[in-house]
Amino acid sequence: MINSPLSQQHHGYARILIDRTEGTVLDYAIPEFLKNRVQVGARVRIPLREAEVMGIVLSLHDVVAFTKVKAIIEVMDYRASRLTAHQVSSSCKDLPERPLLSEKIMQLAHWMADYYGASLDAVFKSLVPQSIRNRSLNEKKITTVSLVKKPSLVFLKELSRRAPRQKQILDTLLQAEGTLRSSQLLKQADASMASLHALEKAGWVLLQQESLSRDPFANEELLPSPIPKLNADQQRAVEKIDQELTRIFHTDHLRRPGSQMDVALDSHCDLDSMYAYSPASKCSSALTRLAKLVSPFQDCLKEPTNSGQSPPRSLGPPVVPHQASQPPRHDQYEISGLTRIFNADCEEAALLRQPVSLPFLLHGVTGSGKTEVYLRIMEKALALGKSVLILVPEIALTPQTVERFRSRLEQTQEKRFIAVLHSHLSEGERHDEWLRLHRGEARIVIGARSAIFAPLEKLGLIIVDEEHETSYKQEETPRYHARDVAVMRARYEGAVLVLGSATPAIESMHNVHQGKYRLLELPERADHQRMPLVRVIDMRLQGKQKGADAILSVLLRKAIAQRLECSEQIILFLNRRGFSSALLCPACGTACSCPNCSLSLTFHRATEQLLCHLCGYHQKPPTTCPSCHEAGILYSGVGTQRVEAAVAQAFPEARSFRIDADTMQRKGSYQETFDRFRKKQIDILIGTQMIAKGLDFPNVTLVGIINGDTSLHAPDFRAGERTFQLLTQVAGRAGRGDREGEVMIQTYTPESPSIQFARHHDYHGFFEQEVVFRKNFGYPPFEKMILIQLRGRLQEQVALEAAALRHQLRLTLPDAIKVGEAVAAPLERAHGYYRFHVALHGFFPKSIKATLRKTLSKSLFPSGIIVTMDVDPQSLM
């Protein structure tokens, strides 16, 4: 139960989720002095046995089951703003107080716990940075000094005789004609804090403490960016989204909290209806309740005409994030007798047109100007007084995205309203950015996956860039997908959601075909440049050509040389870091493997180490075979370090640089490298998927893909889709300026549909053949999938427990749910644990998920066996 704001007045008890107790919920009394401050979502300090602990208020009540309950000790206050210490102490009580988590974020948390089968405690940990939850960090403070009164010349002369340092402080303040930081003042005056305190005691100066934000972009100076003219496709997309923003804005004014209309609309948006499309009868009953509310306005109702125009969209079933569905039934979307057009005068009745905003899928080819569309709709949302949330898939893309948005806002006051949230910020920076958002000091947030929980007020627009990226899926509990959470947050907040990609996820495009998303297309590049020419190089034939090797084919070498002669830039892509991906014995075939994981060790030449890219295990490379002790170990396979060495040998005059997880460990290294590349200080950029998307460098005319097969043969039904997406995205880095681009894909399987469709930039062709494959085998989006994983140290024990669990699930779940065999994971061992999978296919309404969670919780697994449930898994490895 989540109380509405109107119901949160003067309740006597609060139900509180206690930290670090595996989901323990207890009731506590609300003391009289806290009755106006305890709200749903508030962070509180409470007694538990002999200790004091923290918790989150889940709901408020007037009656509890027990007569004696302990009382809440304290409500954590997050109101402190950018004020002086005096102002905070004197006027903080007059500032509006917000709970740690808003009512809508609390609703989102409950949905996540239900949908992903996670505990509320685990969900709340993902919503708020640890430093905020534990209050382990304080805001950075600075001391400022200002003159209280102007000293006379006589006083200064006398002071120079008895206290020359104090006189120098006063002189420095007089010259500054304002306030100075104490550190700056003491340095300029060559004085000490003792002299400063003496002046303060005498009443000459005032020392104040102020909060200083740890701004990750504080030292960057940007020039205002020019505003390009939109082409016709961009203009259409912007107009459609602007219209929806305006419609939602007016709807918000009509939908007053607590009104009958608000209650009726919320009743249609219950958790059960979010998991699966409601039958027509359910939708009909919801619409009937709404229709009764507008019965006083019956004179305003006007039946639709048959003028040839398409009928208006009715209040259809709720949007579900990437939900598998049955074949479309149009009668689910049109409820007879309830789809009407209302006159503009009937404000309440107008809500029936479409109270819920369907997400937009912005499908634009690489270089089509999706970012410019984002900028225009952001400006519209800000003009309507709304805040904006922008998700990017890679931390490496965050600086460039922030730069483009800040450049656009450089000449306005809005530039200071941008906050950034991602894991490469320091703890202090993340702490300060989150508090800025919570206090309403920032209206725009840009960040990676966890930024979807940013505490923005009046959220009006959510943008998910590169929505197809698997990095939006969290691989630890709660295993949420930020794109799908964005769908639900937009619903709760009444915000407009825009999902953008050149290669939308199959599930997203399927949602368009099912009527759940609205499609906006940008089929051409924004500057009307041609898409780059893509050549597929069959590496099976390269061994027959003179001068060829396994890294740089003859054609790719020639193309690189030509671009270097013309002072153009090149990107070489290989999604595998290190020097050699395996060390093999030519005598017995033994490969050097990780003792903790089912992976070969990768040789890194820079550190002369063999490294496991999964668990981090490392060792020195052996000089003889560990098995047969033969000498002559072979370094097999290619990584980015080996590509870098081959480029240096073939083109010694070229300035090359490698960008991967090994070279980008220092904070700010992404931005520094991209700045150097933009300034043409790097000729050849070699990298992994960090350079595959979102980067816009007009002088890049050649992209070379060293091995297009890297992800193609993975034991995962999405392998073909990911290969197509990756190749298309990397290819899109070429030809973004005045010169035509060229892409060369080196591959040993040139006939693969993923490679051929990528060669022709044909997303729709790939989608059509991929959905046939998915439908034939019952894969998402045609059926939902849940992956149960068991892991433990003993292989036989894990295998036995997985088989027993599979048998139990077969007995407890309905026959409509297909329970797969208990099998070893493709990557059977990781971090020293053996892993087995049980895959479930079918449709999973709330009741079935509850049965599944109950079965897992009641199963008595031996100690050392860890069981996890992954809803909508993105990786089967």
Image: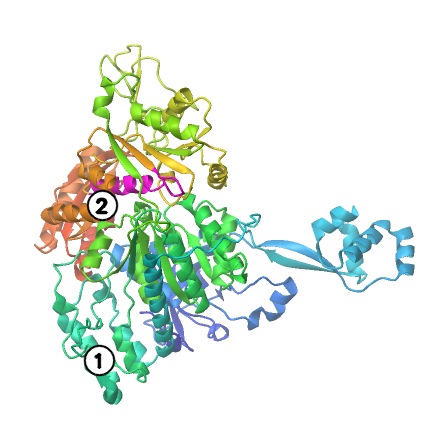
Q: Position of residue 311 (x, y in %)?
A: 19, 73
Front residue (pair 89, 232): 232
Residue furthest to the left: 815
What whole-number distance in Å separates the C-alpha atoms at marks 1 and 2?
46 Å
For label 2, count other residues whose C-alpha is less than 10 Å away and answer few (under 14), some (14-19) or many (20+): some
Quadrant in which the C terminus is drawn: top left
Query: Could you tell whether 521 is left or right of 250 in the image?
Result: left
Q: Give the number of the disc on residue 762.
A: 2
Q: Is residue 564 left or right of residue 545?
A: right
Amino acid on which the number 1 mark rests in the picture: Arg
Residue 689 appears in the picture as rendered: yes
Query: Helix, strand, or loop for circle 2?
Result: loop
Q: Is residue 178 left or right of residue 825?
A: right
Residue placed most toward the observer, 718 or 737: 737
Q: Which mark is residue 289?
A: 1
Pick the residue in front: 750 or 791: 750
- Residue type, mark 2 in image: Asp
Residue 505 drawn at (x, y percent): 25, 50
Task: Look at the image and give the residue range highlighted in magenta.
Answer: 718-741
- Residue at 60 percent across and 70 percent down: it is 91
The residue under the point 39% across, 53% down is: 371
The residue carrying pointer 1 sits among few (fewer than 14), some (14 to 19) or many (20 or more) residues within 10 Å by Cα, namely: some
Q: Quadrant of residue 814?
A: bottom left
Q: At 70% across and 49% down in the image, what residue appears?
A: 183
Question: Would residue 108 be seen by someone viewing this image from the given angle?
Answer: no
Q: Which residue occupies the foreground of this view, 638 or 63?
A: 638
Tag 1 secondary structure: helix
The answer to whether 215 is drawn above or below residue 705 in the figure is below
What number is the disc on residue 752?
none
Residue 510 in the image, given as x and y percentages of width and height: 20, 55
Q: Position of residue 236 (x, y in %)?
A: 32, 62
In the shown orientation, is residue 618 left or right of residue 807? Answer: right
